[in-house]
Image (cartoon, rainbow, N blue to C red):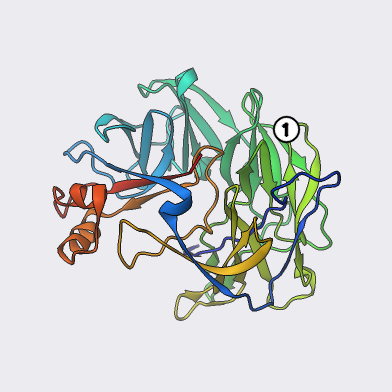
């Protein structure tokens, strides 16, 4: 059975709280059918941006996918080859190449998620095809294996506490025994415990086309992560629900965003997902569940932002002051409470932009020393303090 997944940006969400605390917490209401006024923003006005060029050598060749940015280490993972590349966060210099691709008990088939606990000298590699997490030290030495429910579509690992990951299990409409979207995943034995979020009827963001020969083709939004770190907790976005909840470490749920009209009444469904969240702006994106499998395109989306000071919603454009004509997508998932997002900027695109006079400042200086086949430059964005 062939299964081709087409990712098309999906990201939407709003957070609620005004600048002042009130005795009773309010929530934001978003009408996803409304036509909102436009708002132009400059990234550097409310974010700090740094650029880290990754070292290029025969050993350190990245395909551009950045899996993790920590305090001291950047991780690039090549899924098909199985390479996990560790780079120094400050200089971009290659530290170590790890590859345990294989079918053995201490190996992985595909390093889907890679996260590091630098203080504990541990690296967790989520291997979706085998439904297990391989744990290594930062030198690549095997430590242990965590097996979870076979066939579960675990696509996100967030550190909840010493015992559990906060994770998600994407609902596949073909599966009959899918659990809840949000789960605790035990760091010890992989046990999955459901987190209940109320909804009426289970809906899936995945669209599936079945061909006469029995093969299938699937499509779903590019950003299908439904957990967003925010303040001292997380936003949980259940696609089947009309409320996005703020989930705190004490395991309490509070309404944060309410969307209208109800997703349960729409055909096709229009989903709302949170994106980058700062003290000043809550970025989000609405995505319509439509896809043309013949043209391989669809899932149309609208970028939205809630201005906390104005308490108003806009359709936004965010421009990068270092890169003329570049518009940034802040509808992607909020990475952590310390970082807003990170992105790989391909060397060939930067060289072309440099030749066209579109780059400024430090980014221009970096691009001036790049070769076409070099590893990407990692753009790391965090809220201004």
Residue 278 at x, y = what percent? Answer: 57, 48
Q: Is residue 70 above or below residue 346?
A: above
Answer few, some or many: residues within 10 Å of disc 1's Cα (few below 14, many 20 plus, some between 14 and 19): few
Residue 29 falls in which quadrant of the image? Answer: bottom right
Residue 172, how many percent across, how many down?
65, 58
Mark 1 = which residue?
249
Judging from the image, what secondary structure is the residue with disc 1 in? Answer: loop
Query: Closest to the observer: 119 or 49?
Result: 49
Numbered circles on residues, count:
1
**Can see residue 196?**
no
Residue 150 rendering spot, x and y as whole percentages = 62, 42
- Tell me: 166 left or right of 359: right
202 horizontally vs 105: left or right: right
Closest to the observer, 104 or 83: 83
Above or below: residue 332 compared with residue 134: below
Residue 98 drawn at (x, y percent): 33, 31
Image vertical order of residue 271 relative to residue 211, above or below: above
């Amino acid at each position: 059975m062939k299964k081709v997944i087409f990712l098309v940006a999906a990201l939407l969400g709003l957070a609620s709280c005004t600048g002042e605390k009130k005795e009773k917490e309010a929530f934001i209401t978003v009408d996803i059918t409304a036509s909102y006024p436009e708002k132009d923003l400059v990234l550097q006005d409310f974010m700090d941006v740094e650029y880290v060029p990754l070292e290029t050598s025969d050993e350190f060749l990245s395909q551009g996918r950045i899996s993790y940015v920590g305090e001291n280490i950047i991780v690039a993972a090549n899924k098909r080859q199985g390479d996990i590349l560790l780079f120094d966060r400050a200089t971009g210099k290659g530290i170590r190449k790890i590859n345990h691709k294989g079918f053995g008990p201490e190996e992985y088939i595909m390093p889907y998620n890679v996260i590091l606990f630098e203080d504990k000298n541990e690296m967790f590699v989520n291997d979706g095809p085998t439904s297990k997490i391989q744990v290594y030290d930062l030198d690549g030495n095997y430590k242990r294996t965590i097996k979870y429910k076979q066939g579960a579509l675990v696509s996100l690992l967030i550190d909840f506490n010493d015992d559990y990951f906060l994770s998600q299990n994407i609902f596949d409409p073909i599966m009959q025994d899918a659990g809840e979207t949000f789960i605790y995943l035990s760091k010890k034995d992989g046990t999955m415990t459901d987190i209940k979020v109320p909804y009426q009827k289970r809906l899936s963001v995945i669209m599936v086309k079945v061909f006469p020969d029995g093969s299938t083709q699937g499509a779903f939004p590019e950003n299908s992560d439904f957990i967003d770190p925010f303040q001292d907790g997380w936003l949980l976005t259940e696609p089947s629900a009309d409320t996005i909840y703020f989930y705190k470490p004490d395991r309490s749920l509070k309404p944060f965003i309410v969307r209208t009209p109800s997703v349960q009444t729409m055909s096709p469904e229009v989903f709302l997902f949170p994106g980058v969240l700062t003290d000043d702006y809550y970025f989000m994106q609405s995505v319509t569940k439509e896809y043309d499998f013949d043209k391989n395109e669809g899932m149309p989306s609208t970028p939205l932002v809630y201005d906390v000071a104005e308490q108003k919603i806009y359709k936004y454009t965010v421009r990068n002051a270092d890169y003329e004509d570049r518009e940034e997508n802040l509808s992607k998932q909020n990475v952590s409470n310390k970082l807003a997002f990170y992105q790989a900027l391909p060397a060939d695109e930067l060289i072309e932009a440099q030749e066209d006079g579109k780059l400024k400042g430090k980014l221009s200086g970096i691009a001036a020393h790049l070769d076409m086949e070099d590893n990407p430059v990692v753009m790391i964005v965090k809220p201004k303090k």
